[in-house]
Amino acid sequence: MSERTLRVLIVDDEPLARQHIADRLSHETNAEVVGTAGDGLEAIDAIRNLKPDVVFLDVQMPGATGLDVVDAIGPEEMPATIFVTAYDRYALKAFDAAAVDYLLKPFDDERFAEAFRRARRGQMAKKFGALLQAADEGETRDYLDRITVEQRGQTRVVPVKAIDYITASGPYAELHAGGHTFAVRERMQTLAERLDPKVFMRVHRSVIVRLSRIDTLLRHPGGDYGVRLKDGTELSVSRGRREALEQRLGVS
């Protein structure tokens, strides 16, 4: 079965940079550039109106940055996103904002192709997740029971039942299990969708926690929230997910 053609939006305030990405996309199969935008505000309108599958999104732009675009659309509603930046310090923020990958200027053909492959996989996973969500709630859904990680040239299998919590770390998610940490190159959103929601909850854009490990709900000075696990680890909780967490834990 041939792959579906992906609709791509290119966002960059430099015309040459937009053309550079378009030229590289011309060598990719099943990719169609459906629009371009020269600043963040144009990008917001284009994403809402064109509904692309993939967006190449510059970080630094006039009017609104690439991160502002994600905030305006909402991380859960964004197309598969590849951030493009000339500054390495923006990479961590890009992955916190749910990007499937980022390209550091200047980039070569191989690195571009790798990022686009990740975007294709991310877009397919998002579509698959939407189909599962729309399916009959009475149907049984399979969740991850193990996660494969590469460590020091070896492949290791981490049982999901051993995982206490997961945090985002740049292009990687870090699995924390029994005092050990394992890095896996996967989006937090993808992991959250594939873990049993009765067992795990995403309490922050960069934190997924096993509910049974939570010992105490915290409220820090300034109104920030968090949780303390049974081993003493403290993790951040976003304000928007605090109430849902309290409901899950049966806290009135």
Image (cartoon, rainbow, N blue to C red):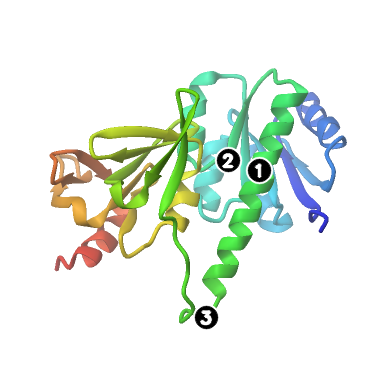
Q: Residues within 10 Å of mark 1 (few under 14, many from 20)?
A: many
Number of marks present in the image shown? 3
Q: Earlier in the sequence, mark 1 or mark 3?
A: 1
Can residue 64 be seen here? The reply is no
> In the rendered structure, which disc, 2 or 3, sits on the residue that comes first in sequence?
2
Residue 243, compared with residue 133, is above or below; it is above
x and y, in percent, of residue 90 in the image: 51, 26
Q: Which residue is mark 2?
A: 100
The residue that mark 1 highlights is 119
Q: Where does residue 215 sit, x and y in percent of width and height?
A: 13, 51
Residue shown at 45% from the left, 38% from the top: 96
Please state which of residues 31 and 221 is positioned toward the viewer in this rendering.
31
Amino acid of disc 1: Ala
Label 2 with label 1: CB-CB less than 8 Å? yes
Q: Secondary structure at mark 2?
A: loop
> Which mark identifies residue 136?
3
